[in-house]
Image (cartoon, grey):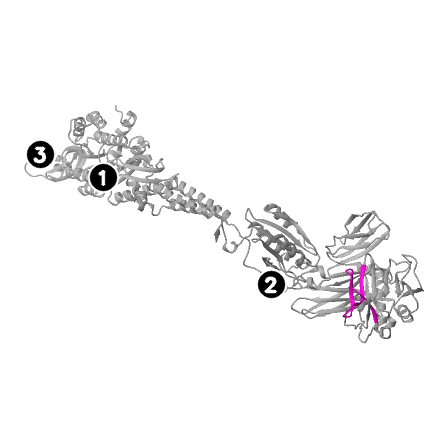
Amino acid sequence: MNFFAPAAFWFAAAIPVVVLFYLLKRKRVVRLVSSTLLWQKYLAETQASAPFQRLRHNWLLILQLLMLALAIFALARPYFAGKVTSSRLQVVILDASASMQSTDESPSRFEKARAGALKLVDGLRDTDQMVVLQAGASTEVKRSKTSEKSALRRAIQDCVVTDSPTRLNEALKMAESLTRDNNEAEVHLFSDGAAPGMKELENKGLRLVYHQVGRSANNLGVVTLDVRPNPEEPSQRAIFTSVANFSAEEKKTEVELLFDGALIETKPLTIAPTNTTPAVFLAAQPRDGVFTVRITAKDDMPADNQASIVSLLPQPVKVLLVTRGDRFLEKALKAAGKVELSVATDVAEERPAVDLVVLDNVAPSAWPTVNVLAFRSMATNWFESLGDVETPVIVDWRSAHPLMRFASLDNVAVAKAVGVKTPSWAVSVVDSPQTPLILAGELGRQRIVWIGFDVLESTWPLRVSFPIFIANAVDWLNPASIQAAQLLVHAGDPFRLALTEPVKAAEITLPDESKKNLAVDPNARELVFGDTAKHGVYRLSAGTNQTVFCVNLLDAAESDTRPREELDFGKFGSVTATTTRRASLEMWRWVAAIGLAVLLFEWWYYHRRTA
Amino acid sequence: MSALLTPELLRRLEQFQLLARRRAKSSARGERRSRARGQSVEFADYRNYVAGDDFRYLDWNLYGRLERLFLKLYEEERELPVRIFLDASESMTFGEPRKFDFARQVAAAVGYVALCGFDRVSVVTFPDLEATAENSAELAARGALRAVRGRKSALQFFQSINELTARGATALNESLRRGALQARQAGAAVVLSDFLDPAGYESGLTALVGRGFQVSAVQILARDELSPATFGDLRLIDSETGGQQEVTFGKYRLNAYRQTVENFCQRLREFCTVRGVNFFRAASDTPLEDLLLKQLRQAEVWG
């Protein structure tokens, strides 16, 4: 225990004064009585006449001293020892991610974290300042630096838990910037630790106190969801999903597939502890619509028990091949699914009526603004040529990139390539030591895949990876599939929609059927909607355009609700959950209350004797 | 007739007579039946005539029937000495009305009843007074009260009682013991006191009983003593001893105090009952009639 105002102990000098008052002869009413015989019983009590004897057994004195001691104690403002390091500035980070909805704590992890944060506010000294951050998909400053406790309490009460994954990094970075020049600052993180990507955080000199909530994990979650055409039966759609079990025991559940809310199929699933089990559904799709996957088992966290995806009926891709003749390429393009291929030697307009343009080693008279697959051709605003590179050796490729799916570049030799430097808007997909060979990226609103060599000057067309790559490229560059990918949004991420025509206003129907109006700048070419904290199906109507998009958690790290005792900060160490350090709880109110009680008791006792 | 007793009360008291449980032993003649044979109208016994007896008491009717001479014996009526022990200590001056006034009234009443019954009344006032000039009038009154007889003396008796004052420290035991020894014959004894003597009352009452007195003890307490009305931090001064005691007394302790008083009285009552002493307790502010006409009568002190 420590004291905020130890100077108050000088008041203890008053204790001898009280004793002195008792030593002084009390003024008594003199009364003549017939005989003191009948009073003998009472005389015995007060008969001691020596001063110090008189102090013995004087309960009034003891009560008064006790009351005085309590008053001094309260004035000294005691608080518990573990809280000596109470800092001048405290940053409270409340994790408001989906995993905080778990009900293993009562009523939920988030409510427990909130209660802990409120306790921290209670323990705040008058001069201390606090910042309240809410960490969801994005970090919100709920209350900027203040020492006003009511405002802080209100801010903490205002925090709401979302369906989004945690981005603690962002919050911690913000906290770090807030506390940078403050040596006494402390960051209090109220979280269950279910957050990815903490390893990159540069936790230098950040005094982080981790208040861990959550006791156990009992959660099943849909962690992936994808819909594709069934390769074996083009009229059908294949829905790929996987369900993860983060509890410590084996779980059985049923996975339901719904199309636009109507149940299509149910599959029983048994998932081993901490394992992920995939499930594939095949379903005919009569129209554009929403597939929803739902698991029926009860668990602590309902936010990830359901995921939805918008599935649009496949449309043929219109491809314009501008070439001086390349049969390999033409064949590969024709083989890449539903493609309406037209071949030309030049493209004269900026926006040809196609979905994508393939430029095969030609410089078009007008650079198209639609998505482009270019072989050696490059516009001047893309990057600069550094001259040719002879026989570049392919050393690496990004197999995780959608372009390289199932495409292996083993045994591919290239005779000559254009040497370039990777620009900022693109990533290198295939590398040689001298130059990137294939670049992919988005310049403005245009997707570009650039191959730095003529395929006819390589062995690539003879390899099986070439048609696969072309098919991947057509898929990746197809605006329809791009849009389809945009219709699947992670909770907390903003939803973007490219506008083909200017609109003035848009209306969004949220999953709970409430409507929200968006004001849109008439000149804007893109519509952004950020309020995607709740998972479910959103319907957007902008002008004549009706769009359905789905917000899902689909985050294995977030679904993993196992409470973490330790937050890993990579090479900068880790922070262990604290249970002992709490808010510096001031006790003077309680001490003063006890003092008041003693005062009342003393009053009563006095009057019992003399009234 | 006097301020002590109202004429109405006196008239009612005239009807009473002190009831003696034992035959009177006094040598003086009076109206009490005694063991002694003498001249009265009450026939007691016969005895054989011996030479020298007064012929006037021979039963001639019997002589006519039996031809033997018998002498008729009559009970001799003798007086009942009544001693009234009146506590005139300082402590008796308390109360509203004063305990001493109440005690004097009782003494006057008892004395009047005795005088009406041709009994000898002596009032023993204690503690003793020093013989000084200013005390002379009271000493004379005390002397006059030593022995009073006859109804005609009643007025004088009342006046003397009226002149008594209360002062000094009680010496209850000593006074009673001395009173018991001084009495030539035992008779009725009435002790009027508050019995608040630090030295106790036991040996004095025992001495009276042992001497053969028929004792009645009347404890007179003031209302203020039964339930005090002064509270707070008090310094109590004993009126008789002058001793000072500091006391903190509150309403919450009133019941405890009352219990103390009750215990004191109960002890006295038990002490008296065991020794055949009539015990009465009266607060000084209760009506005198209640004690005189009810309690004493019920206890058959008089009737």
Badge 2 density bin: few <14, some 14–19, many ≥20, Cα 10 Å: some
> In the rendered structure, which amino acid carries the disc numbered 3?
Asp
**From the image, which quarter does the C terminus of chain A lie in?**
top left
Q: Quadrant of residue A609?
A: top left
Taking depth in this image into account, of B122 and A435 the one nearest to the observer is A435
Q: CA distance from mark 3 to mark 1?
A: 40 Å
Q: Which mark is residue B235?
A: none
Q: Earlier in the sequence, mark 3 or mark 1?
A: 3
Q: Are marks 3 and 1 on the same chain?
A: yes
| Residue A468, visible in the rendered structure | yes
Q: Chain of mark 1?
A: B
Name the front one of labels 3 and 2: 2
For numbered disc 3, what is the local secondary structure?
A: loop
Q: CA distance from mark 3 to mark 2?
A: 142 Å
Q: In the rendered image, which residue does mark 1 sit on?
A: B215
Q: In the rendered image, which residue does mark 3 sit on?
A: B54
State if disc 2 and disc 3 touch (CB < 8 Å).
no
> In the rendered structure, which amino acid carries the disc numbered 1?
Val
Q: Tell which residue pokes out farthest to the top in this image.
A: B1
Query: Residue B216: horizontal and vertical position, in percent?
Result: 24, 38
State if disc 1 and disc 3 touch (CB < 8 Å).
no
